[in-house]
Image (cartoon, grey):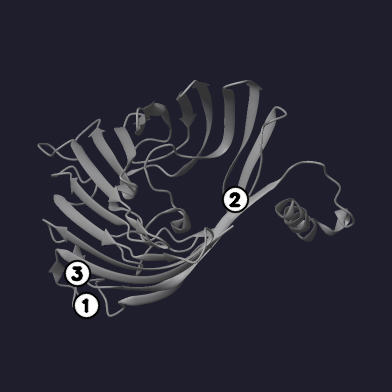
Amino acid sequence: MRKSILAASIAALTAPAAFAGSVVSDADINLNGGMTAGYFYTTNTGSNNNDNYQVSDFMVELSGDAAEGVGFVGAFGTMAGITVLDGGVNNSPYSYGFQYGWLTVAPMAGLSVQAGMLATNVGYEVTPSYANPHATIAALWGGQPVYYPGVRVNYEAGDMGFYAEVNDDALGTATSAWAAGINGAAGSLEYAVSYYNYNGYKDLIDVIVSADLGGIPLAVNFDYHILENAPTAGADDSAFGVALYATPGFGKVAVPVRVEFLSDGTSGIYGVDSATTLTITPTYNFSDNTFVRAELSMVSSDNKIFADDNGNPEDTKTSFALQAGFIF
């Protein structure tokens, strides 16, 4: 009830003056989102700038269930998209405003159609860091789609779900894409498999498997990329990446650990011949909605993809972060 009232208040405050007055609605509107901010330090940035204070995310998401045939999701705010490869310094500039959103039409039980700025089904991690176990996003995320305009059809049958979509996600020479996938459970394992095709440019196979082993959440995310054409004659036309996750917990303290291995040879898909990353993020949860965390991450690459403050090529990066978050 409180979230519905707050959502109505936001709508009243942001409505044009011509519509000032009372807001009357019996719709059940949900309010979700969160905010994270903190301090980030990293080595080998290619400059004398090694640290940064920044708001990682501030997102307000409004939604309505499709219980009566039509639902919606709409999110506004900013996401810095800090990855383990940039360490929170020299990362992409903030993008403010509308981030994603779609309308959902549910003509019958188990079937729904979504249209708008979709959030991809590919990948274990998502862009807002408050929804991830780590302050930085995996290097694997850099090779995955994120948000894009499109239409998706979902069908649920028992414990299994299926989807197919067409979209305008642009990458390389591709200006559109399509995808299909399946998800479900097999015993104690949960899985999701997606095939993503950038028309005329690249194919991506994404596999996610997760389970709870002795009270410890575990997950693996595997990606395999295949280019339609190698970047140059004789170069590699494929790459793969895998990320392993474990999140042991002790009361209000959790210690998420992420290990990655990426290999693209000379394909240029990840920008590394091969690389490994290690991220450890001790987290104290004051409640289900609030947390503080510290993070140490290390990246080691076979080729020198970083540079020191004098511009000399380097093959390693070490980063540290302190971050607080509030989820609503």
Residue 306: x and y, percent?
A: 20, 65
Mark 1: which amino acid?
A: Asp
Q: Nearer the viewer, mark 3 or mark 2?
A: 2
Q: CA distance from mark 3 to mark 2?
A: 36 Å
Report the number of numbered marks.
3
Q: Is residue 125 above or below residue 210?
A: below
Q: Is residue 287 left or right of residue 296?
A: right
Which mark is drawn over residue 75? 2
Q: Is residue 212 left or right of residue 12?
A: left
Q: Residue visible at 90% across and 56% down?
A: 21
For mark 1, give the secondary structure.
Answer: loop
- Compare marks 3 and 2 and give the one earlier in the sequence: 2
Q: Which residue is mark 1?
A: 309
Q: Residue visible at 25% across and 47% down?
A: 244
**Quick check: can you spot residue 55?**
no
Q: Is residue 123 left or right of residue 80?
A: left
Residue 297: x and y, percent?
A: 26, 64
- Compare marks 1 and 2 and give the one earlier in the sequence: 2
If the image is split into quadrants, where does the C terminus sit? bottom right
Give the quadrant of residue 228.
Answer: top left
Which mark is drawn over residue 307? 3
For mark 2, give the secondary structure.
Answer: strand
Mark 2: which amino acid?
A: Ala
Mark 1 Cα shell of 10 Å, populated few (<14), some (14-19), many (≥20): some
Q: Residue visible at 43% across and 49% down?
A: 126
Q: CA distance from mark 1 to mark 3?
A: 7 Å
Nearer the observer, 116 or 212: 212
